[in-house]
Image: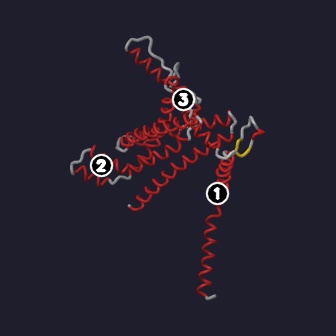
């Protein structure tokens, strides 16, 4: 072996040793992540191919794709999938619209802008169960809720002693859940879009103003195209989380009145019907759908990073 070859081999060994020295501190965290997240998913995947119901322990066995067929053909599951899609689309679109409007307002300079931004972020920081309880009892309650209190105050201004006291959750159950989620997720969309607004080329916008472009023209032809990828990112990330939402449905309506989405239906199948096989199959379906959405989200994030790097 020549001296140059020995030197190269020695350099490769040192490089690999340095790489392992950098990676070794991360190994405990990696092992912990695999044990906590991946092993339970593997077990869930195995159980999804089994006929496993706690009420019939003697009938446990391999059943192939039967559970998946039951998930996709069961009426309750199909209704839950439809409710999940409707809930996700409504919350994401309304949150994006409100987040865009608020981000445009907060992008302007005014006194106390920092304090207003902090207050607007607050709903997203509230624990989901606490937010759902807040809406259920403090706002939607027909006897002492804030919404009916406001209706009573307005009607009494006009001299009426018998104002309507609607039961919001009973009359509009799905809208009630959507409202609570919109309130919580609008700040998240606002943060993403506000970050996009901060990255606009201000010199180009100023040049457009000098050339006579109005505010609507600047928004339509410059600001909105610039925010397209941020809107996509917000929609994809919001969809990932809202598809899996359980807290609001469980707390506000307990899955009744046509509000049972797929996560709540899985909860019922697993903890109430004790049909572990079918619940696991439904869980795997949700994970697959989430992975598909997350793939698009990662592509959008990667394209944003590439654009920022190329500037």
Q: Is residue 183 above or below residue 189?
A: above
> Could you tell whether 37 is left or right of 123 in the image?
right
Which label is found at residue 213? none
Horizontal relation, residue 112 to residue 181: left or right: left
The dot on residue 30 is 1
Q: Quadrant of the N terminus?
A: bottom right
Judging by the rendered image, the residue that carries numbered circle 3 is 258
Residue at the spot x=67%, y=58% of the render?
28
First of labels 3, 1 by sequence position: 1
- Looking at this view, is 87 or 301 the one in front? 87
First of labels 1, 2 by sequence position: 1
Image height of 37 relative to 184, above or below: below
Q: Looking at the image, which residue is at 35% across and 52% down?
A: 200
Q: Position of residue 63 (x, y in %)?
A: 69, 45
The disc, 2 or 3, on the residue closer to the chain's N-terminal end is 2
Give the structural element (helix, strand or loop) at label 2: helix
């Amino acid at each position: 072996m020549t001296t140059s070859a020995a030197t190269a081999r020695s350099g490769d060994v040192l490089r690999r040793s340095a790489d392992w020295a950098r990676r070794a501190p991360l190994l405990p965290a990696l092992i912990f992540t695999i044990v906590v997240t991946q092993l339970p998913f593997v077990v869930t995947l195995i159980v999804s191919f089994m006929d496993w119901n706690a009420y019939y322990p003697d009938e446990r066995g391999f059943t192939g794709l039967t559970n998946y067929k039951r998930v996709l053909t069961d009426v309750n599951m199909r209704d839950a999938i439809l409710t999940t899609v409707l809930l996700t689309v409504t919350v994401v679109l309304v949150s994006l619209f409100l987040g865009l409007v608020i981000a445009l307002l907060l992008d302007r300079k005014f006194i106390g802008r920092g304090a207003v931004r902090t207050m607007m972020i607050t709903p997203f920081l509230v624990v989901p169960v606490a937010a759902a309880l807040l809406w259920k009892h403090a706002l939607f309650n027909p006897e002492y809720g804030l919404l009916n209190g406001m209706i009573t105050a307005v009607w009494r201004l006009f001299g009426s002693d018998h104002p309507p006291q609607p039961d919001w959750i009973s009359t509009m159950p799905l809208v009630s859940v959507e409202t609570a989620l919109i309130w919580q997720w609008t700040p998240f969309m606002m943060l993403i879009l506000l970050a996009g607004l901060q990255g606009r080329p201000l010199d180009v916008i100023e040049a457009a103003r000098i050339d006579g472009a109005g505010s609507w023209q600047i928004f339509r032809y410059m600001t909105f195209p610039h925010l397209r990828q941020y809107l996509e990112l917000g929609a994809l990330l919001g969809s990932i989380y809202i598809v899996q939402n359980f807290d609001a449905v469980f707390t506000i309506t307990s899955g009744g009145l046509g509000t049972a989405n797929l996560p709540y239906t899985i909860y019922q199948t697993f903890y109430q019907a004790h049909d572990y096989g079918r619940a696991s199959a439904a869980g795997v379906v949700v994970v697959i759908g989430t992975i598909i959405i997350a793939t698009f989200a990662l592509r959008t994030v990667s394209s944003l990073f590439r654009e920022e790097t190329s500037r």
